[in-house]
Image (cartoon, coloured by chain):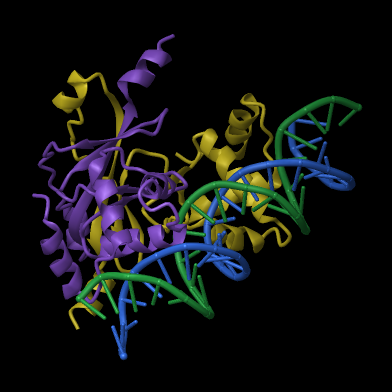
Chain colours: A yellow, B purple, C blue, D green
Amino acid sequence: MKPTVETLARRIREKGYRLTRQRQIVLEELAKVDSHPRADQIYQMVRRRIPNISFGTIYRNLKTLQELGLLSELQYGHKSARFDANIGAHQHFMCRVCDKVVDVDEDFGLDVNVPGLKRLGYEVEEYRLQLLGLCPTCKKKEST
Amino acid sequence: MKPTVETLARRIREKGYRLTRQRQIVLEELAKVDSHPRADQIYQMVRRRIPNISFGTIYRNLKTLQELGLLSELQYGHKSARFDANIGAHQHFMCRVCDKVVDVDEDFGLDVNVPGLKRLGYEVEEYRLQLLGLCPTCKKKEST
DNA sequence: CTCGATGCAAAGTGTTTGCAGTACG
DNA sequence: CGTACTGCAAACACTTTGCATCGAG
């Protein structure tokens, strides 16, 4: 599943990009966690390995890696975007109290071919499903 | 469906808020359209009736009316939020080219009781479905 | 009258960008 | 070596906030 550095480098090179130390480490750090961190959290994570990396580089690389299909950006009704290196098709659950995001691999077998839309000439290409509710921790606190 | 001014006033009063001219007109203007406008578009719409209204007032009222459950905010992966006075349960289609948002009233009969989440103690309370694709206009342009 | 709401402008927040120097391939 | 990338800081876009004043109830 996880591409080797060589595969990665080739893939990046093909599009005219370069595999810099910064770019590689941004992706590595994001791939390590499943917490869907925000840009500032990724900045902190990467800074442990490249102390003088800048926010500009973080944002530029997050964007580039997205173009390359190596990560995706989540925008779930909150000010700042969150990032996810899990690029397989999956949905997300988000806790309405603590904002924690959890991957949901379930296949919902959704038929997005809405007749009404189709008739009007709309073409649905993909869907994103957000499940909202309480995580176990916040559920416990709530019942107090 | 559409509440009278009196009903609205009472509902707002109950929570300790006041029905000001500004607040009423923000809601009226949003209810007129189904285009899910951004805050700056709402500002322009309201400014035709209250020429010296400020952005602060627009944002404060959009927030207050949201708390009152009279409108909702959409955040679909773009910088600025969009607003919707249609408060019935419905989903949204968004064109990936022109960003147009269309209401989809279809009931998808989705079972969000994901066994894996349930087992771990997560509680799903609601879901939001985003359909993404091409609107008729952009579809036509695309095939050129 | 009282206290919540307004208009204005200034301050935030998260993200993007211009530039001169750096380093990948 | 050429050109994409970096660090830095300044610029941006959108939203929030402090304050004096206004006006709904």
Answer yes or no: is residue A24 visible: no
x and y percent of residue B108 in the render?
13, 39
Residue drawn where x is 33% and y is 28% of the image: B133
Q: Quadrant of the C terminus of chain B?
A: top left
Residue A29 appears left or right of B53: right
**Toward the viewer: C5 or B144?**
C5
Residue drawn where x is 39% and y is 34% of the image: B99
x and y percent of residue A139 in the render?
22, 72
x and y percent of residue D6 in the render?
73, 48
**Toward the viewer: B85 or A47?**
B85
**Toward the viewer: A17 or B92?**
B92
Residue drawn where x is 67% and y is 27% of the image: A16
Number of numbered markers:
0
**Toward the viewer: A39 or C6?**
C6
x and y percent of residue A88 in the render?
37, 39
Residue D1 appears left or right of B70: right
Residue drawn where x is 21% and y is 42% of the image: B91
| A106 w.r.t. B101: above or below | below
